[in-house]
Amino acid sequence: MTYVPVPEGEKKSTAGRDPVDIPDALVRQLQHSDATGARCYIDLSPDDDPAEVADLKRAIVRAGYRLFGTKTIHKKFTPDRVTYWVGPKIKRGKKT
């Protein structure tokens, strides 16, 4: 996957920025994952817009900071799939 920079309108300035919304469907998936331990999958194709995939990644990270302060969102990005789930925070150097 290639790096897609943050759009100019969303970059942080010295005055800060307004919080960007997290899609409701993503929030519900993460809450379900938190309650059941299920893993969420999004299949990617070469036709997907790289900007939309980058926005999805940012939304997942944003949700981790805002909604799951005592837990973490584990993420695995491969060229054909995004996998993420809510789980306990793991000490550095440990694997899931």
Image (tube, rainbow, N blue to C red):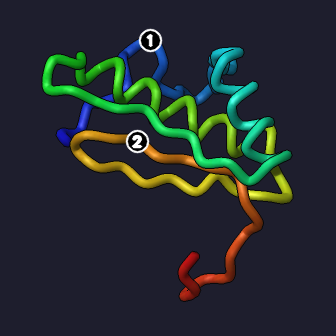
Badge 2: few (under 14), some or many (20 or more) residues near its Cα, within 10 Å? some
Q: Residue at x 28, y 49 (%)?
A: 78
Tell me where residue 76 appears, x and y as whole percent: 43, 54
Tell me where residue 34 appears, x and y as whole percent: 79, 47
| Residue located farthest toward the top when viewing the structure as drawn | 9
Tell me where residue 22 appears, x and y as whole percent: 66, 20
SS for dot 1? helix
Is residue 64 rendered to the left or right of residue 78?
Answer: right
Q: Residue at x 35, y 32 (%)?
A: 43
Quadrant in the rendering for residue 81: top left
| Residue located farthest toward the left when viewing the structure as drawn | 46
Residue situated in front as seen by the camera: 5 or 39: 39
Please name the residue that numbered disc 2 is placed on: 82
Badge 1: few (under 14), some or many (20 or more) residues near its Cα, within 10 Å? few
Quadrant in the picture for the N terminus: top left
Quadrant in the rendering for residue 2: top left
Amino acid type, callout 2: Val
Residue situated in front as seen by the camera: 48 or 4: 48
**Mark drawn on residue 9:** 1
In the displayed structure, would residue 22 be above or below residue 87?
above
In the displayed structure, would residue 62 be above or below residue 21?
below
Q: Nearer the viewer, mark 1 or mark 2?
A: 2
Amino acid type, callout 1: Gly
Is residue 46 rendered to the left or right of residue 26?
Answer: left
Query: Mark 1 to mark 2: distance in Å?
Result: 26 Å
**Mark drawn on residue 73:** none
